[in-house]
Amino acid sequence: MTEFVALGHAGSDAYAGLESFPNPGVDRVEMTSDELTAFCPITYQPDFYTVTILFEPDALCLESKSLKIYLARFHDQGIFCEELAVRIRDEVAEALRLDRDRVHVTLRQKARGGITITASV
């Protein structure tokens, strides 16, 4: 049985990185959250996102509580939408031991100043 650090423990103190578990036989996984926030590194205004992570797993799947805590850690980081999409894609791919082209991330930034940004990798 897989031992999880975050799952089954309250709060982000249990976060130990993106956790995974053996793939039970799925070909595709899509995870979506509207709880991602960061801030503009220039204006320091908050940015609110919906993130969708789509991956084609080999041996491992992504554990959702560790993902939730991982995403919450961006709330105090100044980062552009496009850079954040790439960072999430790369870190999920690394955690799942997948090539980056097997992980797709779409960030939809809530409109600020009348402009909505969608970045996909």
Image: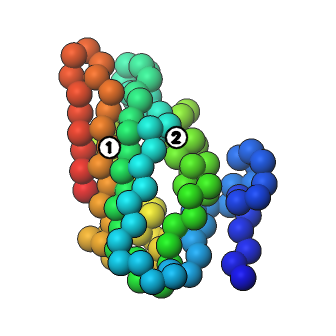
SS type, badge 1:
strand
Q: Residues within 10 Å of mark 2 (few under 14, many from 20)?
A: some
- Residue 51, quarter of the rendered image: top left
| Viewer-proximal residue among 42 and 5 | 5
Q: Position of residue 15 (x, y in %)?
A: 69, 55
Q: Quick one: quadrant of the N terminus? A: bottom right
Name the amino acid, label 1: Leu
Q: How is the image coloured?
A: rainbow
Residue at screen point 41% across, 29% down: 48
- Which residue corresponds to the image point at 78% horizontal and 48% vertical from the top-left? 10
Residue at the disc numbered 1: 107
Residue shown at 57% from the left, 64% from the top: 63
Q: Which residue is mark 2?
A: 74
Residue 86, can we see it? no
Task: Where is residue 68? Give x, y as percent.
Answer: 57, 49
**In the rendered view, does 83 fall on the left or right side of 37?**
left
